[in-house]
Image (cartoon, rainbow, N blue to C red):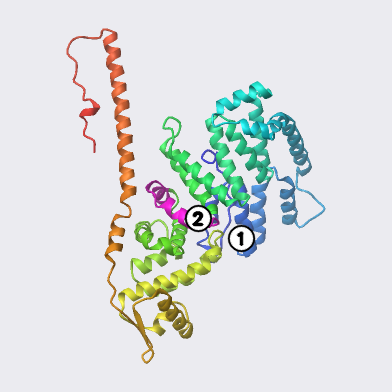
Amino acid sequence: MPAQQQPETPQLQPNAMLKYDLTTKIAAYLDRHMIFPLLEFLESQEIYNQSTILNAKYDLLKSTNMVDFANQVWQAINNTDSKNAPGYEQKRTEVLAHLEQLEEETSEIMAMIQDPAVIQQLKQDKAANIQFLRETHGYKPEMLSSWYNYSMFMYQVGRYGQAAEMLYHYRILTTDIEKNISAMWGKLAAEILGNNWETALEDLMRLKELIETRNPATTSHSQQLLQRTWLIHWSLFVFFNHPKGRDAIVDLLFQPAYLNTVQTSCPWILRYLAAAVITNRKRRSTALKDLVNVIKQESHAYRDPVTMFVECLYVDFDFDGAQRMQKECEAVLGTDFFLVSTMEEFVENARLMIFETYCRIHQCIDISGLSEKLNMDREEGEKWIVNLIRNAKMDAKIDAKTNTVIMGTQYPSVHQSVIERTRALTFRTSLLSSNIDKRETELANRRNQLAQVQSGTRSTGGNSGRRDRRVLPSEEVVA
């Protein structure tokens, strides 16, 4: 389970141009198999020394069962095709022998699960399913343990599709809570590595619900915080590949529990939250204010060109600084595995945000000066501004003689103001209701415990003399 063991992170030494690279920070919260795509991306970008990337790959691969792949990387490092990595033949033989053993151990349960007639008779009740299989197909508990080991072995050798399918069936039957949670993490990783984004999003939301409904007896607050941190990092794969992912990441990270996790454990995630808000025109008007507040609050803990762009534009109103940060953002996004595909969209929306903010402050705007602030030449900037005014139906006119844009007076919509003030009312109400329910449950439990203590005292015929008056939970003042 991710919260219990972290893989070794490849230690890459970035050059001066890559001081904003987050690979090593993000890799600390990923399964080792999920780090491979990041290293492949860095290798294709040629921004690190190739030998450094190859050594990082080999450090990850040598602890997996992908022995052939690891041997190929070792040969590339040593520039040879005739020699194999030390211990390669022995480990390959052991992996193949283990595979044959697992196939033999799971042959019976494999036949059960692959039988359509059996699948149709399975129900939601796991205990009933196990009883049915025991009575009709000779099911034994050790079969399911072998199935779990086999599915994890498939993941270790890189057969992610088969591993995801096997873990899905395992979760239908298992009643072991810890292994069920581990299987959920494993299935999510397998779906991500198989690029099955729709299923991965569903598994991500299920895992989130499981984390939020923790059992205080088995999961501490610190463990829950760590699990949320892992979930946030894994979710980047899903949110920046799923068609509706940018809406989902905004919804997730602005929830109080997850925003607190970002601020406490991983402030660098603010880069991805900011990029999601900037490139999401539909959600930007409602999420921008919260984004500005959290970036301003956490500027002491983390800053990069993406967050500094927002800070320059909406905190300092420094348009020259925003222009410089926009240029740097292009370099940062171009070397970020998750954001490289959003670069053009980000630049376009960043220009739009600069234009909108500049227009709110100025009534008469010089097109040449504004084009420069948008990192565009005069002719290109004029065309862009004209098209924007026309398409957005803005109250503005262009004076061709003076080469300026004259903005009309704009008043905020009453309806929009009401929406802005009440948009979080439903969420805050539900949160308050949930907190009250939790408090009432705690008080009820304490009353029961106190009643049991008092009942035990009476039954043992305790001292009938004076007793200290105890304050009942009902007498406490609930904040």
Q: Do the residues labelled 2 and 1 touch (CB within 8 Å)?
A: no
Q: Which mark is residue 249?
A: none
Q: Is residue 294 left or right of residue 82?
A: left
Q: Mark 1 points at which residue?
A: 42
Q: Position of residue 263 (x, y in %)?
A: 40, 51
Q: Is residue 56 left or right of residue 309?
A: right
Element carrying mark 2: helix
Q: Where is residue 322 in the image (x, y as percent from the top left)?
A: 41, 71
Is residue 56 among the parts visible in the rendering? yes
Q: Give the range drawn in magenta.
A: 240-264
Q: Name the residue under label 2.
A: 245
In the rendered image, the vertical position of residue 57 relative to residue 410, given as above or below: above
Q: Which quadrant would the C terminus be assigned to in this image?
A: top left
Distance from disc 2 to disc 1, alpha carbons, whole Å, reads: 23 Å
Identity of the amino acid at label 1?
Leu
Is residue 325 among the parts visible in the rendering? no
